[in-house]
């Protein structure tokens, strides 16, 4: 039993290395034009999310509802098993561990479509490091990528939100919306 735990830890460390390496390579290779668009003019929004706890789904559901009410077109993508309970009230695509090879390459049609969509804004709704999203963020065509502040990931985002340790994803979403709505071009 201990050997299986050890083996899994080693595999996770190797995958993290390859996610970081791949993301760095993708950031150098793909130079999508980035810009901050007036939020009112934004039409398409990409959303990356992972459920870390039971309360998160309420905040994400509320965020999607707000985007729909504002007339924004959204595409949501997550990384989790379909066999899990589905606490979400909106349509989303997903990929799982079986879609990721040993070297961190993601072979999934929903991921490929997500990367190739020219979003006005892409929001990464994760308050914990999520290496599996790094290659997606690095190669996506989104004009403005917004996410949680991680000092070693500044190349992945045009705007990063820093939270206090006790603050959760609902505060992250509130801050993301607040600052992107504050962007105006004269």
Image (spheres, rainbow, N blue to C red):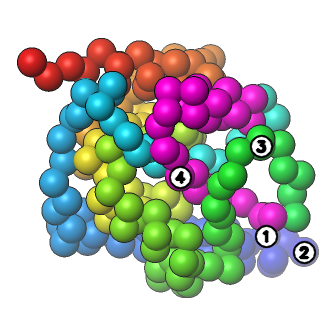
Residue span colored magenta? 56-82
In space, the residues marked 2 and 3 are separated at their CA atoms by 35 Å
Disc 3 residue crowd, few under 14, some 14–19, many 20+, Cα 10 Å: some
SS at circle 1: helix
**Mark nearer the N terminus (4 vs 1):** 1
Instruction: Answer whether labels 3 and 4 touch (C-beta < 8 Å).
Output: no
Question: Could you tell me residue 17's position as x and y percent?
Answer: 44, 69
User: Which sits in the foreground, 186 or 23?
Assistant: 186
**Left or right: where does residue 133 sit relative to residue 49?**
left
In space, the residues marked 3 and 1 are separated at their CA atoms by 32 Å
Residue 85 in magenta?
Answer: no
**Left or right: where does residue 45 sit relative to residue 56?**
left
Judged by depth in the image, the label closer to the viewer, 2 or 3, is 3
Identify the residue position indicated by label 3 in the image: 88
Residue 104 in sight in this render: no
In space, the residues marked 1 and 2 are separated at their CA atoms by 7 Å
User: Which sits in the foreground, 61 or 186?
Assistant: 186
In space, the residues marked 4 and 2 are separated at their CA atoms by 41 Å
Judged by depth in the image, the label closer to the viewer, 4 or 2, is 4
Disc 1 residue crowd, few under 14, some 14–19, many 20+, Cα 10 Å: few
When the figure is inspected, residue 15 is found, relative to residue 41, above or below; the finding is: below
Disc 2 residue crowd, few under 14, some 14–19, many 20+, Cα 10 Å: few
């Amino acid at each position: 039993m201990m050997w299986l735990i050890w083996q899994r830890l080693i595999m996770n460390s190797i995958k993290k290395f390859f996610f970081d390496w791949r993301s760095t390579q993708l950031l150098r290779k793909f130079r999508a034009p980035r810009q901050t668009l007036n939020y009112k003019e934004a039409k398409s929004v990409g959303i990356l999310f992972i459920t870390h706890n039971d309360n998160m789904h309420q905040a994400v559901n509320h965020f999607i509802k707000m985007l729909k009410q504002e007339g924004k077109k959204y595409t949501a993508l997550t990384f989790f098993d379909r066999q899990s309970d589905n606490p979400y009230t909106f349509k989303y695509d997903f990929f799982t561990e079986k879609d990721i090879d040993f070297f961190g390459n993601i072979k999934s049609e929903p991921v490929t479509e997500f990367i190739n969509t020219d979003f006005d804004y892409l929001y990464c709704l994760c308050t914990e490091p999520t290496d599996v999203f790094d290659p997606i963020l690095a190669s996506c065509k989104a004009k403005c990528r917004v996410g949680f502040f991680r000092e070693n990931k500044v190349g992945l985002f045009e705007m990063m939100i820093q939270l206090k340790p006790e603050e959760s994803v609902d505060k992250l979403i509130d801050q993301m919306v607040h600052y992107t709505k504050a962007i105006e071009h004269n």
